[in-house]
Image (spheres, coloured by chain):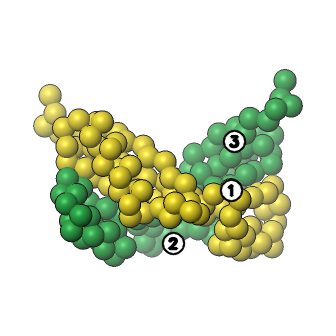
Chain colours: A yellow, B green
Amino acid sequence: MFHARIFVTRRPSILEPEGRAIKQALGTLDYDEVTTVRMGKLADLEIDVAERSEAERIAEEVAEKLLANPVMEDFSVEVSPVETPTAA
Amino acid sequence: MFHARIFVTRRPSILEPEGRAIKQALGTLDYDEVTTVRMGKLADLEIDVAERSEAERIAEEVAEKLLANPVMEDFSVEVSPVETPTAA
């Protein structure tokens, strides 16, 4: 069993209005040190396979086919084993 | 200058319908190995301060005050220095 975290972000050249709005709100709260805010999506998956490479393949396919818009968005994937109390 | 990535996720006890819908779609695509999907939010901030501890403090305050709903959501923060070509 593996845990996969998928990060989906807009490509740097594409305007991201939600982050822009948050940046503006931060200005009114005097957080002037924050120069850029860009929002993205996060997906946490549990994948029940034996091999890490298999979990990575599935997570990348899920990101590509369902989660990310390939024209506007980039994605990256992090896979880690799920610790189970019964693991030797 | 630091880069902060803020992860906002629903608390495990709270239903997350978007992930449920994606899980269902994955079933019809024969990804039965994916047993759970939970969606969350991601914020990428650039913070123009000299000290990492200061960047961490600001990112945590931003997450707490603006990004996360403390009743339903948890957040975590990762801070890393931004490499600049002019750095000695």
Q: Earlier in the sequence, mark 2 or mark 3?
A: 3
Residue type at tag 2: Asn
Q: Nearer the viewer, residue A33 or B46?
A: B46
Query: Horizontally, is A75 left or right of B54 in the view?
Result: left
- Left or right: residue B62 compared with residue B11: right
Image mark 1: chain = A
From mark 1 to mark 2, how far is it between C-alphas?
Answer: 27 Å
Note whether B7 is above or below B52 in the view shown.
Answer: below
Q: Do discs 2 and 3 share a chain?
A: yes
Q: Amino acid at mark 1?
A: Pro
10 Å crowding of disc 2: few (<14), some (14-19), many (20+): some
Q: Is residue A77 visible to the viewer in this orientation of the structure?
A: yes
The residue depicted at 30 percent of the width and 74 percent of the height is B21
* Residue that carries the numbered disc 3 in the rendered image: B53
Element assignment for label 1: loop
Q: Nearer the viewer, residue B21 or A85?
A: B21
Query: What residue sits right under mark 2 in the picture?
Result: B69
**Residue B16, how many percent across, how many down?**
35, 72
> Residues at badges 1 and 2 in contact (C-beta under 8 Å)?
no
Disc 1 and disc 3: Cα gap in Å?
27 Å
Q: Nearer the viewer, mark 1 or mark 3?
A: 1
Give, as a three-letter code, the residue at label 3. Ser
Residue found at x 51% / y 72%: B69
Determine the image quadrant of residue B58: bottom right
Q: Dot 1 corresponds to which residue?
A: A12
- Secondary structure, mark 2, is loop
Residue A63 horizontal side relative to residue B83, left or right = left
Category of crowding for the residue at label 3, using alpha-carbon neighbours closer than 10 angstroms: few (below 14), some (14–19), many (at least 20): few
Q: Position of residue B88 (x, y in %)?
A: 84, 24
> Where on the picture, by quarter, is residue A2?
top left
* Quarter of the image that includes the C terminus of chain A: top left
